[in-house]
Image (cartoon, grey):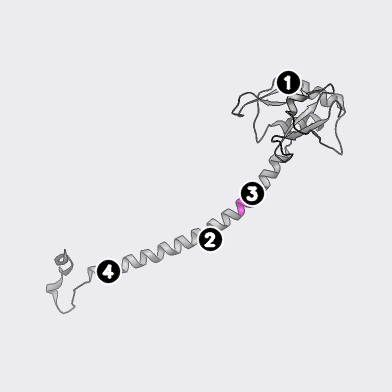
Amino acid sequence: MAQGDHIYCSIYNNDKPPYHHGIDCGNETVIHYQKKYKDGNDGIILWVSMIEFAKNRKIYLEKYDTFDPPIVVFMRAKQKLGEETYNIFYNNCEHFARYCKTGKPISLQVEKAKEIVVNDGITVADGLSKNLINVIISAESSKNSIHKSIEDILNFGRDKDDDDNDNSFLNLL
């Protein structure tokens, strides 16, 4: 690894996503978004040791087909030091590292999550709409049954030829 490299490691000790990203500064140090507090909702871009960044996890090198020169990458990272505008969806550690490397703030992890949510969301919405139609049909059927039952109760004991039974329903109470 060398100055200006985009590096990453698993946030867990299992080498699987999600990953934490940073920029190698070339002297066993890394610039990255670091949690400010234990809850992880806030972050700040700091320059830390490689050991602090990795926390005993395996470090990987992100490969690019096209990227800016290492000095540009390093200078972009340095210019961001102290930034506190972390947002998991729009400005996370991967956005930062890819911005430094290419000038474009992109998080492939976020993009993948959006795909999953959209695709699964469409499937869920489709299932919900089908269930909603069944619920509406069932409610309509129940409504018709209730109306029929009420009519039957109101007409209970009525005889077309006998007007004395008009209050038959009330007599049942």
Please give the residue where the numbered disc 3 appears in the rendered image. Answer: 118
Marks 3/2: CA distance?
Answer: 18 Å
Marks 4/3: CA distance?
Answer: 48 Å
Mostly what secondary structure, the magenta segment? helix
N-terminal of the pair, mark 1 or mark 2, is 1
Taking depth in this image into account, of 88 and 164 the one nearest to the observer is 88
Please give the residue where the numbered disc 2 appears in the rendered image. Answer: 130
The amino acid beneath tag 1 is Leu
Q: Horizontal and vertical percent for residue 57?
A: 75, 32
Tell me the quarter of the image containing the C terminus.
Answer: bottom left
The amino acid beneath tag 2 is Lys
* Element assignment for label 3: helix
Please give the residue where the numbered disc 1 appears in the rendered image. Answer: 81
In reply to whether residue 119 is colored magenta, the answer given is yes
Q: Callout 3: 10 Å neighbours few (<14), some, many (20+)? A: few
Please give the residue where the numbered disc 4 appears in the rendered image. Answer: 151
**Which residues are drawn in magenta?**
116-122
* Element assignment for label 2: helix
N-terminal of the pair, mark 3 or mark 2, is 3
Q: Residue at x 81, y 36 (%)?
A: 62
N-terminal of the pair, mark 4 or mark 3, is 3
In the depicted structure, whether residue 135 falls above or below residue 63: below
